[in-house]
Image (cartoon, rainbow, N blue to C red):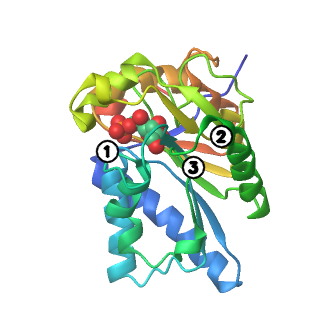
C-alpha cells in the first residue's frame, strides 16, 4: 500500500516536544470549553508519556487549564491483571495523570483486563460504542514500540482491526521486564483499541524519544505501509504528526 510520509517535528529534548504536544491539546480543550462542548482525547501509557503528562499537570496547576470538559479513552490494557494491579495501565494513568487533574471520573474510560473470556468481545464492542457515542476521538496520543506497535497492535495487525483481545509480541514482553521484574510475570495478552479505531481519530500525535526508537521511527515515517509495522499505517492518516527528540530522529532521511 502506498502512503505519504508522516509530518514530523524534531525538538531539542522530550520536554520541549511534550510542551508542544500539551499546548496543542490545551488549545483543543479550551476551544471546546468556550463553546460548551467536550474534547475527546485518546491517551497512551508508557515511559514516553511521562514528560507529556507532567506538562499537562503543569498547565492544569499553573496555567488554569481545566479538564472538566474532557472525555478520555485509554488505548489498551494488559489482560489478566486486576484493575488495582500496580502494573495495570489503569494504575499507571491514575498515578501519573488522572489523580492530578480535574477530569471528571465518570469521563475516564478504560479497557478492562480483569474480565473472563466470555465477557471480552461484548466489552470491546461496548468500548467502540462509547467512543462513537462521545462523538469520536478528537486527538489521539500514541507512543511506539521498538517493533512498530501502536497500542498493543503488534506486527501482523490489520489496518482495519477494531478493539479486541490480542497476543503481546515477545519483544514487547521483554521490554516490559523493566516494569514486571521477570519475563514470566509479563502478561501474554492484552485488550487494545484496533488500528482501524485509532485511525478514525481526527488528529493523531505520536511521541518518541531516544536512539532506541530511531530505527523504528524511520521505518514508520519513511518505509512502506504494511502490517509488518503497524505504526506505518499512520502514513494513511490525513492529520497524523510525529514529535521526536533529536536522538529519535537521528536516522531519518532528509525531507
Ligand atoms: C501503551 C502503548 C504502547 C506504548 C509503547 C511505547 O499504552 O500504547 O504502544 O506506547 O509500547 O512504550 P514506552 O513509551 O514505554 O517506550
Q: Secondary structure at mark 1?
A: loop
- Tell me what residue is drawn at x 73 percent, y 16 percent: 1
Which residue is more in the foreground, 238 or 180?
A: 180
Which quarter holds ligand 1? Answer: top left
Instruction: Say which of 17 and 146 sits in front.
Output: 146
The answer to the question of whether label 1 and label 3 lie on touching residues, with beta carbons closer than 8 A, is no
Mark 1 CB within 8 Å of ligand 1: yes
Marks 3,2: beta carbons within 8 A: no
Q: Residue at x 61, y 56 (%)?
A: 139
Whether the residue under disc 3 has CB within 8 Å of ligand 1 = no
Query: With respect to residue 92, does 195 lie above or below?
Result: above
Q: Does 120 sit above or below residue 84? A: above
Which of these two is toward me, 212 or 169? 169
Q: Is residue 51 left or right of residue 139?
A: left
Q: Nearer the viewer, mark 1 or mark 3?
A: 3
Compare marks 1 and 3 and give the one earlier in the sequence. 1
Name the element at disc 2: helix
Kindly identify which residue carries mark 3. Answer: 111
x then y, percent, for residue 30 = 57, 78
Whichever of callouts 1 and 2 sits on the residue coming sooner in the sequence is 1
Q: Which residue is mark 1?
A: 47
Task: Give me the residue at 39% from left, 78% from top.
Answer: 60
Amino acid at each position: 500500500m502506498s502512503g505519504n510520509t508522516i509530518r514530523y517535528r524534531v525538538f531539542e529534548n522530550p520536554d520541549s516536544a511534550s510542551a508542544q504536544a500539551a499546548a496543542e491539546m490545551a488549545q483543543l480543550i479550551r476551544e471546546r470549553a468556550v463553546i460548551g462542548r467536550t474534547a475527546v482525547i485518546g491517551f497512551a501509557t508508557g515511559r514516553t508519556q511521562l514528560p507529556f503528562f507532567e506538562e499537562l499537570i503543569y498547565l492544569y496547576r499553573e496555567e488554569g487549564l481545566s479538564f472538566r470538559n474532557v472525555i478520555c479513552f485509554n488505548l489498551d490494557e494488559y489482560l489478566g491483571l486486576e484493575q488495582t494491579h500496580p502494573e495495570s495501565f489503569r494504575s499507571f494513568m491514575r498515578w501519573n495523570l488522572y489523580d492530578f487533574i480535574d477530569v471528571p471520573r465518570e469521563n475516564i474510560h478504560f479497557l478492562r483486563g480483569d474480565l473472563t473470556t466470555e465477557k471480552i468481545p461484548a466489552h470491546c464492542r461496548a468500548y467502540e460504542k462509547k467512543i462513537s457515542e462521545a462523538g469520536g476521538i478528537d486527538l489521539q496520543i500514541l507512543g511506539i514500540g521498538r517493533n512498530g506497535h501502536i497500542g498493543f497492535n503488534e506486527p501482523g495487525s490489520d489496518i482495519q482491526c477494531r478493539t479486541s483481545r490480542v497476543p503481546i509480541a515477545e519483544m514487547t514482553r521483554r521490554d516490559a521486564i523493566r516494569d514486571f521484574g521477570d519475563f514470566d510475570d509479563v502478561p501474554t495478552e492484552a485488550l487494545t483499541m484496533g488500528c482501524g479505531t485509532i485511525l478514525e481519530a481526527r488528529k493523531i500525535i505520536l511521541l518518541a524519544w531516544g536512539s532506541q526508537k530511531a530505527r523504528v521511527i524511520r521505518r514508520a515515517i519513511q518505509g512502506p505501509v504494511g502490517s509488518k509495522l503497524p505504526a506505518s499505517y499512520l502514513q494513511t492518516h490525513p492529520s497524523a504528526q510525529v514529535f521526536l527528540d533529536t536522538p529519535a530522529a537521528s536516522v531519518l532521511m532528509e525531507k
